[in-house]
Each structure stands twice: as structure tokens, then as C-alpha cells.
Amino acid sequence: MAEVLVYVDHVDGAVRKPTLELLTLARRIGEPVAVALGNGAADTAAVLAEHGAVKVLTHEASEYADYLVVPKVDALQAAVEAVSAGGSLAAVLVPSSAEGKEIGARLALRIGSGIITDAVDLEAGDEGPVATQSVFAASFTTKSRVSKGTPVITVKPNSAAVEAAPAAGAVEALAVSFSDKVTGTKVTARTPRESTGRPELTEAAIVVSGGRGVNGAENFAIIEALADSLGAAVGASRAAVDAGWYPHTNQVGQTGKSVSPQLYIANGISGAIQHRAGMQTSKTIVAVNKDAEAPIFELVDYGVVGDLFDVVPQLTEEIKTRKG
């Protein structure tokens, strides 16, 4: 069976959820071979093996922390060459973050292959892996495959359930020779993100968002309370972000972040096409809006026509009561 390279997104050895989802998808098309780079790479092996990695290729070097993107592309290229030399390589899978898509694009260019970005599903095909994408602001669903070279595919978080599938997880050192381009962009300083205790927006199973109808930064406390009752992440529409009511890092939409949670709750959001582009692939969508003609109601699974200042606090209390 052909092998599938899976780029491991981790922080000092702690593997992030999108990588485990990639291992689930990789098993559909071949044998997963994980590539873990940087500080703590070897510490990822146990959890990767638990979720299906037959091998874990590791390489630790200061370049991964000191410079942007290029060292990781060099390492993935080395992994592609090593696996291809020893057998058949079906695809390279990368989490579809901003960094992941840049890594994927650079790698595809180097190995003379095609790339598919923001896939939401993956299946085996007679002529190679077939990826499902949600395109044109999620108005259409397409199936496509790379017709030249080894497919490089970036996959959106929450596209697959994490499934345990114990495998060997044999750790092997990856030989990497860094190119001259590695030092082109140096990291000069880092500032830790202030923790809210909530899940990462793009990885969260539940997202609660607020829009223009929240009517002020101080009123986002209502949105946060609902999110906290559900263990959810907090999102915001572009209108709310542009008004300075919530940080840009929480913006959901075409010019913000794309999310695909199990449950998306939109409060006071009209549903402009730019916002829909960032959340329309959510599995279940709920909207609260006092305008019965708001476009958001065209795509929801459940809609509540009402004032969010009446509806949301009642919903929060009901959730707390049922949980308590």
C-alpha cells in the first residue's frame, strides 16, 4: 500500500487536533507516515502511533523556530524524496492553516506537483486521491484530484472525526539539508497570545459568533457567556470587528478565518456572502436575528426570529440548568 505523508502541527511535542484528523483521512488512501519537526518532535510519536501513524519521521533543529516556513518546506521535500525512493507515495497532507497553505504551495512547486487547498473530505480514487472542496462561498461542492506528480492537499480543521487506530509508530530520523533560502526571513521576537481558556477558533467543535446586532463591545459579554456555557470558541463578523467591538483574530469570513465546526451559532449576523464564505461548511447552523428577512436564514438548520438580548441569555441559562 502507498504511504501518505502527514505534516504534524505540534507545539513542543503536544500534537494539535487537526493533525489527528489528517491521520484519519490518510488511512483512507494509504499508510500514514507522520513528519514531526522542531523542538519536541520525538515526543509526538506516542500519540501519532495511537492514531494510525505507521512511521514517524523526526528532525529537530533551531532553524524551525528561528526562521519562517522555508525550513519546514526543506524538511517535507526531504521526506517526499526519502519515501518516494523507498516505495510509493500517495499524497502529502497538511493542515489548512495560513502557514500550512504556504508550506503546501511551496512544496508543490518544488516537487513539480499540483495542490488542492481547503479540502473538507478525502477518498481513494482509481487515479489518485479525490478531494472534496466547498467553493464559491460554499455555494458549490466540487470533487477534484491532482493530475500531475504527488498530490499536496491541505485539509480544513473539523473535516474528519479523530479516530484511534493503533499502529507501529516507528520513529526514524529524517535527514534534512537546509537550502540557502532558509535564512531569508528571521523571527526576531515572539509575544505569547493571551489565553482566554476557550478553544482555538478554527479547531473548535462549537463556535458562537456575534455581529452588528450585538451593538457594542460591552455587549459581547452575552456572546461570551453563551460560548462558555457550551465550551465553545467566540467568533465575530467583519462588521463587529471593523467597529472595534472584537479582535480581528476572531473574525469569521472571507477576509477572516474559515471555520467548520459541528455547531455554529450566529447572533445578530445578517449573513452577507463574505461571512457565509467562512462558516457555511459548518455541520449544524443556528441563527438568532430579529430580522426575519435576514439572508442568514437561507442557510440555517434552525432559526430564531427574535432579539438576541432576550434570546441568548435565556439560552445560556437553559444550557447551564441542563448541565447542572
Image: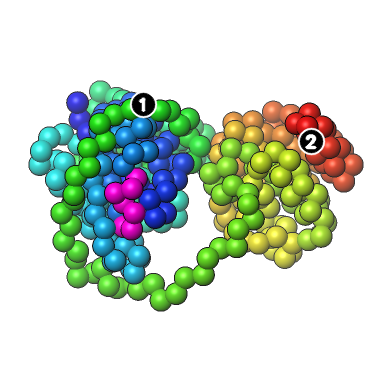
Location of residue 65 (image quadrant): bottom left
For the C terminus, the image quarter is top right
Whether residue 135 appears in magenta in the rendering, the answer is no
Compute the Cα span from label 1 to label 2. Answer: 35 Å
User: Residue farthest to the left?
Assistant: 85
In the displayed structure, 3 sits above or below 61; it is above
In what element is the residue under mark 1?
loop
Front one among 52 and 303? 52
- With 10 as the anchor, is 244 left or right in this view? right
Q: Is residue 252 above or below residue 280?
A: below
Magenta highlight range = 38-44
Element at label 2: helix
Closest to the observer, 239 or 27:
27
State the residue position of label 1. 165
Q: Position of residue 148 (x, y in %)?
A: 22, 40
Which residue was labeled with disc 2?
320
Residue 115 in view, yes or no: no
Quarter of the image holding residue 55?
Answer: top left
